[in-house]
Image: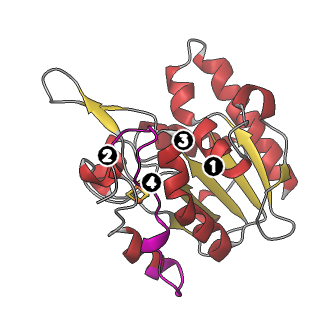
Amino acid sequence: MPGSSEGGAGSESYDATPYLPRRGGLPAHRRAAAECRGCPLHEEATRTVFGRGEAHARLMLVGEQPGDQEDREGVPFVGPAGRLLSRALLEAGIDEEGLYVTNAVKHFKFTSDETRKRRIHKAPSLRETLACRPWLMAELRLVSPELVIALGATAGRALLGPSFRVGADRGVPRPLPGAEEGTRVLGTVHPSAVLRARDRDAAYAGLVADLRTAADTL
Ligand code: SF4
């Protein structure tokens, strides 16, 4: 069992690599990811939430991690943030049917409130994000999209490195390091950040504008 120190520099490594299948497509990877013990997040979460959608999508969306509802249903982006994202995609003229949607981290990280009735989202550490990155890289290799949209800082850091900042780096397509030639990545806010924003209308408009830029890039 890998170490359980959260985000710290424990002596045992966090790494999903040993759990990846040597061959096979998305279904084989989805099955293998269900058994991943590459970091401690599997201990409290209900299940692995792997990506879904078109196997050879031109556009891939990468979020942070599953939320409470995604953890229960085993499907990414089905909760409130997912519903907001669907609306924004529609407004930006992007057909959701043709997408592949996944998260940088495949297990739900949370804390419980005092009554232990509500599970409260907690952002994954960089260490956990990097541990889970082999699954994301495998999805990128298998789907081979033309453009990846990184939704929020965790996805941006997983794809573009730890210096990625949403505020400074959003809305501009750039080459995706280590991916197939021609694949680009565009960062924007996570839809849950729009839900939490003080000026929700402005945050939503910013998300739609970035998605329109993505649509024009294809
Ligand atoms: Fe494996 Fe990722 Fe889950 Fe950690 S979060 S156990 S690396 S699938």
Query: Is the residue at mark 1 in contact range of ligand 1, meaning its CB lies under 8 Å from it?
Result: no
Q: Residues within 10 Å of mark 3 (few under 14, many from 20)?
A: some
Residue carrying label 4: 76
Inter-mark Cα distance, 1 to 2: 21 Å
Q: Is residue 130 left or right of residue 1?
A: right
**Main SS of residues in magenta:** loop
Q: Which mark is residue 126?
A: 3
Answer with mark 4 or mark 2, whichever residue precedes in sequence.
2
Q: Nearer the viewer, mark 4 or mark 1?
A: 1
Residue carrying label 2: 4
Q: Is residue 79 left or right of residue 105?
A: left
Q: Residue at x 65, y 73 (%)?
A: 143
Q: Is residue 24 left or right of residue 45?
A: right
Q: Residue at x 84, y 59 (%)?
A: 218
Q: Is residue 133 left or right of residue 76?
A: right
Residue carrying label 1: 158
Q: How is the image coloured?
A: secondary structure
